[in-house]
Image (spheres, rainbow, N blue to C red):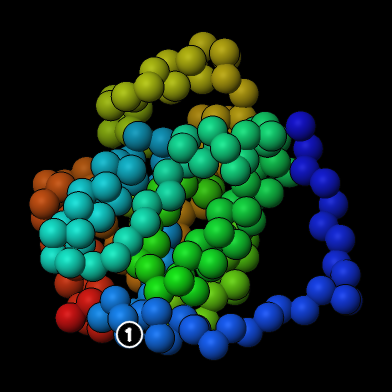
């Protein structure tokens, strides 16, 4: 199913409430941010994001993890996998992540999001420094050898069309805030790299 065209109404105005992002973040003793994990299917996005969220929770920080499959069970259950629907999927996630950041949360997202323009679209929704692109840098060979859901096998057999990395392009980030050598390091090491990057940006202290 294709998404409906976006309609702007000049009569709709953003209402600024007394309790704002700054106060919410201050109460949580953290800075809001959106960590956007991108990479091929099987790269380890959800695994690393989940391990990072667990560590952040143990340290007392307030987070929420948006995962690609989970979101398609509800918010984006009406969308298919055409180029238009995939873009709408990312747009909705971006808007949701923006609202969660406004609540003062550290938001982690795990989506292939193969196109630079779509990731830039989400970056543009947020204030400078609040969007942190995390490239889960795992080679196609490694991802295909893992194939946790058997998707690469189906794609190679022609059972899945427009599969990223096989017959659909993945545009790797050119200058990600965090570049994770996911095929070479342990999960704990990768989480440590993320935490250090967050400390350097004073998202957490």
Residue nearest the observer in this picture, 32 or 162:
32
Q: Report the residue at 62% width, 54% height from top.
A: 92
* Element class at badge 1: helix
Left or right, 5 with reference to 190: right
Residue at 29%, 65% (x, y): give it.
Answer: 62
> Is residue 7 toward the left or the right of residue 68 in the image?
right
Q: Position of residue 169 (x, y in %)?
A: 56, 42
- The percent coordinates of residue 86 (x first, y second) are 64, 43
Given residues 200 and 7, the one toward you in this image is: 7
Residue 124 in view of the camera: yes
Write the residue at 13% across / 59% down. Answer: 58
Q: Which residue is mark 1?
A: 26
Up-down relation of residue 205 to residue 41 (above or below) = below
The picture quadrant where one finds residue 108 is: bottom left
Percent position of residue 107, x then y: 39, 62
| Vertical position of residue 99 compared to residue 66: above or below | below
For mark 1, does the 10 Å Cα neighbourhood hold few (<14), some (14 to 19), or many (20 or more) residues? few
- Residue 193 in view of the camera: no
Please identify the residue farthest to the front as the structure is shown.
Answer: 18
Q: Position of residue 11 (x, y in %)?
A: 88, 76
Q: Quadrant of residue 163?
A: top right
Q: Is residue 173 left or right of residue 185?
A: right
In the rendered image, the quadrant that contains the C terminus is bottom left
Taking the image as shown, residue 58 lies to the left or right of residue 20, namely left
Task: Count all numbered tags in the image, as a single digit.
Answer: 1
At 57% from the left edge and 14% from the top edge, which residue is drawn? 158
Quadrant where the image shows the N terminus: top right
């Amino acid at each position: 199913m294709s998404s409906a065209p976006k309609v702007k109404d000049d009569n709709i105005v953003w209402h600024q409430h007394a309790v704002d992002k700054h106060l919410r973040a201050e109460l949580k003793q953290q800075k809001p941010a959106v960590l956007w994990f991108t990479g091929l299917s099987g790269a380890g996005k959800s695994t690393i994001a989940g391990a990072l969220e667990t560590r952040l929770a143990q340290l007392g920080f307030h987070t929420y993890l948006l995962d690609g499959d989970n979101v398609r069970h509800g918010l984006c259950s009406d969308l298919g996998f055409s180029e238009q629907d995939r873009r709408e999927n990312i747009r909705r996630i971006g808007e949701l992540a923006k609202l969660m950041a406004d609540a003062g949360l550290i938001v982690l997202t795990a989506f292939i999001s193969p196109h630079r323009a779509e990731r830039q679209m989400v970056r543009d929704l947020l204030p400078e420094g609040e969007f942190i692109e995390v490239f889960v840098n795992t080679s196609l060979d490694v991802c295909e050898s893992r194939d946790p859901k058997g998707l690469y096998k189906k794609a190679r057999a022609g059972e899945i069309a427009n599969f990223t990395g096989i017959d659909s392009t993945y545009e790797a980030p050119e200058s990600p805030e965090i570049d994770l050598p996911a095929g070479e390091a342990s999960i704990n090491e990768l989480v440590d790299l993320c935490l250090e990057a967050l400390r350097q940006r004073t998202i957490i202290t």
